[in-house]
Structures are given as C-alpha cells and as structure tokens.
Amino acid sequence: MLEIQRVGVVGAGTMGNGIAQVFAQSGFDVRLCDALPEALGRAMASIDRSLGRFVEKGRLSNADRDATVARITTGGDLQALADVDYVVEAIAENLDAKRAVFTRLDAITPPHVMLTSNTSSISITLLASATKRPDKVLGMHFMNPVPLMALVEIIRGQATSPASMLTATQLCMRLNKTAVEAADYPGFISNRVLMPMLNEAMFAVMEGVGTPEAIDTVMKLGMNHPMGPLTLADFIGLDVCLSILNVLHEGFGDPKYRPCPLLRRMVAAGQLGRKSGRGFYTY
C-alpha cells in the first residue's frame, strides 16, 4: 500500500478528470491519459475550476492548489503508464472498448500492478478475463462529482483476491472516501437501485402522469431527495442512463429493467441532458 505513489487514470472525461483530481489532491503523482488532446485540455481546465472553488471556500490554499495541478501530467499514449503503481480506467461504458484497454494495460504494466475500472455497471469478471492478472482486477466506482462525493463502490470480480480488495479499501481511506463492497452483479448496488427509479420517472413523464417539474418536486419534498430523479438523470447523462439500463436488462433478463422508450428517443435525438444543453430540462 505504501508503495503506491504513481497512479494512472485512463479517460479524461467528467469522471476521469475528477478521479485524477482527488488522487493528486491526496498527494499522488497522476498520469492522465486520453487519445483526444482536446479532452485532456478540457480535463485540466475542469480540474483548475474545481480546485478554484475549493480555494474560494477556504478548503484549499493557493499553494496546495498549485501543488495539486503540478502532480498531474497528461498524454495520449498508454505506454506512459508503464511504470505506474496503480491504474483506474474511466473511459466510456462500452465492454469491448474497456476490455481492449485492459488487455493493453496488462501488457504494459508490471504484473503486480492492480488494474481497476470506474465502470458503473459492466462485469468486473469480464474485464478481468481480458488480462493475465484477474486477481488484481476490481471495480472502483466513484460517484459524480468525484471531488465532492464520499462514496466509492469497490466491486469484487470472480477472481479478485482479498489482498486486492484490502488495498483498494485502504486507498479509498487515503483519498478521504468511504469504500463499500459490492458483488459483481449488473449495476452493482448503486445503479441496480437507482436506475429503475429514474427509469420509472421517465415512464411517468411519457405516460403523462406528471411533468418533469412535478415529478422532481414530489421526490424532493415528499421523499426528501436532494435532487429530483429527472434532474439527476440529466446530470448523469441520458446516454449513460440508457447504457446502464441496457446492461441491467440484458444481464438479468428481467422486463422491469426495460429502458423507457422516451429515454431511447431522447438519446437518439441527441438530447443527453446537461452536457448537450437539453434533456428533460433545457440548460
């Protein structure tokens, strides 16, 4: 555990840049990789804004902000991760793409290095089978926004060793996060419980039971949720919600996980929520 100092993060999207930030804030040297140079530029700008808000609120000094940024290096070639001590993959929710990354990481990194995934629903066992070190592969599912959310789901694959689970749990403590173990079932704990609720809210909109505003208000004021389900779906990304629901539906074969047809239409139309400027609300 004490030997983990250099951390590789693969994928510089919303989750990847947040993961890179929390590791760097906790004193780790971070190598953030993405094939798209523009994604790396956006990631560093996002990290800078996030750290700036911590400084404004008095939770971080200017010196600590500068030191955090200095600990992050970026690049487009996975080969740069050849000497890291730990890897977190955070690319898009696509099984084939993730397996390809894990196969490459397995070839590049030393055999003792743990390879983890930020996947929100895909089988860790399937990802681990793309490597020769399945005992050192596990899920490390951070919550969005990563710098603010305390939870990390730690998912044990079929072959994940107890030592690997312990290392990941201890690592979460160094990040000031709370680790909760979940079994390798579709959606794990968080999305197996959350996504059917969001999906049902979408069905309620489609069937005219209530407007998005009405549904969100009922859940906020009636159930004491900090954010309504449709606002949350827009925040997560409707394409991401659809991907997770598809994994649940295919994984369990249960019609209760069938994605709402309205969600499918909105994603097909490019109405993805906050990131596209329009979802159940306009941004």
Image: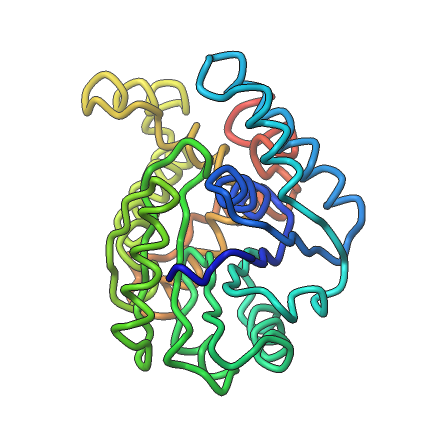
Location of residue 244 (image quadrant): bottom left
**Looking at the image, how many numbered discs can be counted on the residues?**
0
Question: Can residue 126 be seen here?
Answer: yes
* Quarter of the N terminus within the rendering: bottom left
Residue farthest to the right? Answer: 37
Closer to the camera in the image, 176 or 279: 176
Closer to the camera in the image, 206 or 51: 51
| Residue 87: image location, x then y, percent | 52, 63
50 lies above or below 129: above
Q: How is the image coloured?
A: rainbow
Q: Is residue 169 left or right of residue 36?
A: left
Q: Is residue 106 left or right of residue 141?
A: right
* Quarter of the C terminus within the rendering: top right
Location of residue 267 (image quadrant): top right
Question: Can residue 253 be seen here?
Answer: no
Closer to the camera in the image, 209 or 155: 155
| Residue 128: image location, x then y, percent | 44, 78
At x 19%, y 25%, the residue is: 223
273 lies above or below 248: above
| Residue 36: image location, x then y, percent | 78, 53
Residue farthest to the bottom? Answer: 132
At x 66%, y 41%, the residue is: 270
| Residue 33: image location, x then y, percent | 68, 56
Q: Is residue 92 left or right of residue 220?
A: right
At x 52%, y 48%, the residue is: 28
At x 40%, y 22%, the residue is: 211
31 lies above or below 279: below
Q: Is residue 121 left or right of residue 180?
A: right
